[in-house]
Amino acid sequence: MNKGIAILLFFTCLYGQASAQTDTVAMYKKTSVMIPMRDNTKLYTVIVSPVNPKSAVPILLERTPYGADIPLEDGTEFPIREMGALRDMAREGYIFVYQDCRGKYKSEGTMEIHQPLLHATEKGAIDESTDTWDTIDWLVKNLVSNNGKVGIYGISYPGWLALVGSVDPHPALKASSEQACMGDLFLGDDFHHNGAFRLSYGMEYSYEVEFDKTTDSEFPFPQYDLYDWYLNLGALKNVNSRYFKNKIPTWNNFVSHPNYDAYWKKNSPLSYIQYPQVPQLHVGGYYDQEDINGPQLMYAHMEKKDSFNRNYIVLGPWNHGQWGGSKGDSLGKISFGSKTGEWFRGLQKNWFDYWLKGKGTGNFEEATCFQTGSNTWKTYTSWPPKAAVIKKLYAAPGNKATFNTPGAAEGFLSYTSDPAKPVPYRTLPIEATYGTGSRWKQWQVEDQRFVYTRPDVVSFVLDSLKEDITVTGKIIAHLFASTSGSDADWIVKLIDVYPAIDPDNLAMSGYQLPVAMEVFRGRFRKSFSQPTPLTPNKPEEFVIDLHDINHRFKKGHRIMVQVQSTWFPLIDRNPQKFVPNIFEANAADFIKAEQRIYFSAKHPTYIELPVME
């Protein structure tokens, strides 16, 4: 979910003012209309259509909670050079439609974040699927020069709207592309990861969307660096008592539903989306700081019942929506060696051109996944690829990592986790998520040397590689750990450590690039629905999904596994004392704890690496 990716269309002229290609369509025009839904609620809709098209053209729809309007008067005509990232599609003729979803900006009705689809089980129910159906029905019946075919797409929240809009679709809807779509909001996207609450994002985003339905609202922080502000906030119960006053519905739901109960399950796309009813292109980024899990999760979920070969996935080296309007040639200090964003937009054009215009062969690859490290695009007939062989990288004594099975009867490293001194998830300052100067977009590639020497972070490092190792597929951590408390968070990172002297780029020498990272809240080790306390000082196994990657660790590099118990304020502070509801914890519940990471024969900590031979 990102307000900055609502519409990647106007005044982002990526291609310059001149073009050697003769334009099929030279001019576009803006109009707007209030489209009535089946319950007579009207949704504000902007239509950007070609002026005097030579033939009937398809409709490409994007629905959004972030404001669909564009800064032009109705009836204004403008040249295609102002179509920005969509210029190539515009040149060959499309009708682009943008709509405020129900209850936001200029649309009527009420809005609450990420509501489930109900129309199939509740007679007369209204949801985002029915609103999409009604919108498309109006468009194909009322827009002149349309060819009767519609595609829907979007990034972030608009991506989720594209996903749910393709459930029980209108007959004119021929293709969909959900991009950076949030999946299950308790298990792995936006507000929680494996039950651990994403504090700064969850608080700031829910306020942004729900404080004022007519606009996006920035929380009025009194300072720029928010690390101390969030620390001084104290227990989560202070958010409502001091600031929200129970007026933000989504925050109230966080408080009322601290576990994976019926509320979260009902709201999960896993419960109301079963298979692709139209061709679906899932798009995600390995470094998506908001919805890293959604495209991977929904592709895998829908693939199980894809009997018509309609389900495809593209994964790239991107942060949240980076492919939508930028060159995509780098992120932070990491270069990708080519303009991956522009490359993807070419693929996206081919995708919609085929399904909506009948152009091209339609021979799309099942999975198209950029390989970081080697900086090359790869294609696969299945995702993850079946050719990968699982190899176990073990933690070992002396802060070492090894591919050899542990033989020692005992072995562990320990550290003290103090909620009063949490490990920052990135270097200070911690700016407001979408505030001025925010580095939120690139923190997932930040050099991890800023925490490497902290006493509450432990690392296990493999010797320098003698040859390249390519890891492609899902990364699973098996962490054997104990705590002196009765609850704990575990953050596990898989890191590519550059050579001490990097001949390719001296400034990158020793860089610790996080390839995969994830958090797990210990109370949910047995069940996300029924949390249970940890037994103090008892070693237990925590299995943590670090998501899908495609990365080549190069010869001369090292592989590091890193573990810590706080990641602040990205993740709220676990009291480390089991309480029924962390949102209602008191200040006295927060305690120090000794954490142990084991690497013995009986309790072997390791990471599963799917290695391509």
Image: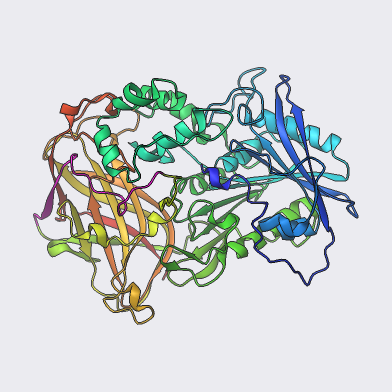
Q: Residue furthest left?
A: 410
- Identify the residue at image location x=79%, y=69%: 21
Give the left or right position of residue 410, taking residue 528 as reference. Answer: left
- Please state which of residues 29 and 355 is positioned toward the viewer in this rendering: 29
Give the left or right position of residue 174, taking residue 273 as reference. Answer: right
| Residue 218 appears in the picture as rendered | yes
- Please state which of residues 127 and 41 is positioned toward the viewer in this rendering: 41
- Residue 47 belongs to magenta span: no
- Please state which of residues 238 and 219 is positioned toward the viewer in this rendering: 219
- Please state which of residues 372 and 478 is positioned toward the viewer in this rendering: 372
| Residue 198 appears in the picture as rendered | no
User: Residue 551: x, y in percent?
Assistant: 42, 65
User: Residue 481: x, y in percent?
Assistant: 18, 46
The residue stretch that appears in magenta:
409-432
Give the dominant element type of the magenta stretch: helix, strand or loop: loop
The correct choice, above or below, for 258 with respect to 608 in the image is above
- Residue 416 belongs to magenta span: yes
Image-quadrant location for residue 23: bottom right
Q: How many marks?
A: 0
